Image (spheres, rainbow, N blue to C red):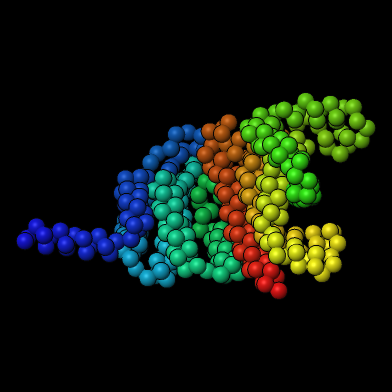
Amino acid sequence: MTAISEYRKQGRVAGKLDKLGVIVTAIALLALFLQPFALFRANRIVAADNVMVWSAMPLWQAVALVVAMLAAITVILFRTPVNLRLAVSIAAIAVLALMVGRAGYYLMPSDNPYARVSPGASFWILLFAFSIAMADAIVRKALPPMVRIGFLLVAAAAIGLLLWSGAWNDLSILKEYNNRADAFWREGRTHVELAFGSLAAAAAAGIPIGILCFRVPKVRATILNSLNVLQTIPSIALFGLLIAPLAWVGRNVPGAAELGIAGIGFAPAIVALFAYSLLPVVSNTVAGLDSVPRDAREAARGMGMTGRQQLFQVELPLAFPVILTGIRIVLVQNIGLAVIAGLIGGGGYGTFVFQGITQTATDLVLLGALPVVGMAFAAAIILDALVEISQGSARKGSRR
């Protein structure tokens, strides 16, 4: 009887645990006590010294941080209300962001301007764990699209306030930024031009091609298979393959060089991104048009609509959510792929990534990588919300 009652007690305790919370708790505890909270370097390229949380700041601050993290982990471990989980996850992320700045202030020596203090594995793993818990809480709450966009804007404002306050000024990534502020914003503009320019070109070409594939089934397989083959070429290889033909165009076509067309640089980068963008746009256009209900088409024909009117007033509006999903895939993909442009002088944040790799400067790599992650994350949230809004509009339109 004792064994049975003990088994039942264990079952009741296990039933109170949150499955994701158990995983987050295990990851967070291992990171908090076994991984360094900060890294110290005498200069930007030497090997780093690991600094645990209790050595990265005054002891009372370290104790306060550990207690706060343990309290947050406890809330996430059990099946607590969603609103509480969300609030605690956000608070834990905010505390981590502030305390890693305190670690930079405490560890940075006043007599060595070349020293560098970086967030350690403990900070990044804890940030990841609480971000997962926050995302899970947001999904469970099923927030409306505009609320999710508002949440994103608040998060962006909070990050901007953190950077403006100077709380991270002693961290090495901000020192790298201060040394390259003009280049950072210049490469940022180039990165946006690469990602959005290739998307605009792919949408302008891909949607008509998708309409052609839908209207002429005989060419659908040929076009989609060709684009599939193009999609299988590794990104670096495609960038390299474009160097020779674009160099020839730049040398031999009048006016091409003045437009910036050359073997390396912006031109091959945007052409490669355009090529990678075509398949999602074309295939989603075809899928969207295929998904238009037959009743809607028959009603349009019954009203005496021409083929052109039917396409623009009925089929494309109803197919728009699926087409927009393809555009979302392309934008997130191109924001990431544009990093490779740094290898061929195309600019963008990849410039910092590859400079950091060649100089073994981790913080320079992060200076290029973190904005890319942020841009892709924001683009995914905004376009997901727009897809959901357009789906609601399409459903209302189909009922009418």
Counting from the top left corner in percent of width and height, residue 94 is at: 46, 62
| 372 and 157: which is toward the camera | 372
The quadrant holding residue 159 is bottom right
Q: Quadrant of the N terminus?
A: bottom left
| 119 and 227: which is toward the camera | 227
Residue that lies at the very extreme toward the bottom in this rendered image: 400
| 165 and 343: which is toward the camera | 343
The answer to whether 77 appears left or right of 185 in the picture is left
Q: Residue at x 91, y 30 (%)?
A: 253
Q: Quadrant of the C terminus?
A: bottom right
| 345 and 209: which is toward the camera | 209
Q: Residue at x 69, y 69 (%)?
A: 398
Q: Is residue 112 visible?
A: no
Eyeballing the image, is 279 above or below 23? above
The answer to whether 166 appears left or right of 285 in the picture is left
The answer to whether 78 appears left or right of 117 in the picture is left
Figure label count: 0
Counting from the top left corner in percent of width and height, residue 396 is at: 67, 72
Counting from the top left corner in percent of width and height, residue 100 is at: 44, 54
Residue that lies at the very extreme toward the left in this rendered image: 1
Q: Residue at x 84, y 63 (%)?
A: 309
Q: Is residue 166 visible?
A: yes
Q: Residue at x 22, y 64 (%)?
A: 12
Counting from the top left corner in percent of width and height, residue 331 is at: 66, 50
